[in-house]
Amino acid sequence: MNLQQLIQEIFAKKSFLCVGLDTELKKIPLHLQSNPNAVLAFNKAIIDATKAHCVSYKINTAFYEAMGVKGWEIMEATLDYIPTCHFTIADAKRGDIGNTSSQYAKAFFETLNFDAITVAPYMGEDSVRPFLEYENKITIVLGLTSNKGAHDFELQKTGNQFLFENVISTISSWGTPQNLMFVVGATQTNHLQLIRNIVPNNFLLIPGVGFQGGSLQDVAEFGINNEVGLLVNASRAVIYASQHENFAEEAKVIASQYQFEMAQLMNHYLTKK
């Protein structure tokens, strides 16, 4: 799926919800845990329950890599199960010297065929460029994160700018809004308008709504653009909505609530633009 197809899905569904499949065996309902294919069965049930209400799925690869070869196979099977009308993100946060990044890009864009991957930009342009060279694939670069450690580097001033401003501004010149997104934590809405001024046309992937306390209202108010320009990720709030046998139905309820609120926010803010 390319960006224009994603935008079409957002407007068709009146949703910019991304469901995060950060699945841990010990956190899924007990009645599934004895299943030899428990994680995959759980993921399939969540996808079936939420696919009408979201436009994207984000697979945090660490939860699968931690299981070794079996985890990698589960990740592949999960990706294959996601409908082609949904935008798929490998939340892998890769980024290394150029030839290594080329192999990471090949792994996630060719072998696994994700639509997008998250990338850490600390090593500079040659570590990001191999991902940007893929046609109809999107590189999602860490911009401003919600974790406590963001104050160690991202929120430090370099001259009159925060470091994250310099990073986002510089990286925006390496690609286009068609192949480059940025991660901005939902709890950083006090800086979201500033980021929108730097990259008015790029999509932003926004984690942190739900358990982490981010406000969907604030994200829309300061982040929405004419093409919506937002993917708001919800992981635990959706996939662990229930620990009982009705977990999929409860996930559907939460996803539909997000979709309903997103539809209202789109109607409100897009009419003002």
Image (cartoon, grey):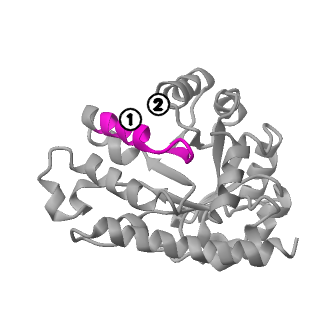
In the picture of the structure, the residue carrying the numbered disc 1 is: 76
At x 65% / y 72%, what residue is drawn? 263
Looking at the image, is 195 positioned above or below residue 36? below
Asked if marks 1 and 2 touch (Cβ < 8 Å), the reply is yes
State the extent of the magenta-drawn residues as a range: 71-90
Q: Image quadrant for the N terminus?
A: top right
Q: Residue furthest right?
A: 273
Q: For the C terminus, which image quadrant?
A: bottom right
Element carrying mark 1: helix
> The disc labelled 2 sits on which kind of residue?
Leu
Left or right of 254, for residue 264 = right
The amino acid marked with disc number 1 is Glu
Residue at screen point 83% across, 41% down: 173
81 falls in the magenta region: yes
Q: Give the image location of residue 136, x and y in percent.
A: 68, 33
Residue 230 in the figure: left or right of residue 101: right
Residue in the picture at 48% in, 69% down: 255
Residue 27, given in percent of the width and then of the height, sits at 25, 62
Q: Nearer the viewer, residue 127 or 53?
A: 53
Front residue of 182 and 1: 1
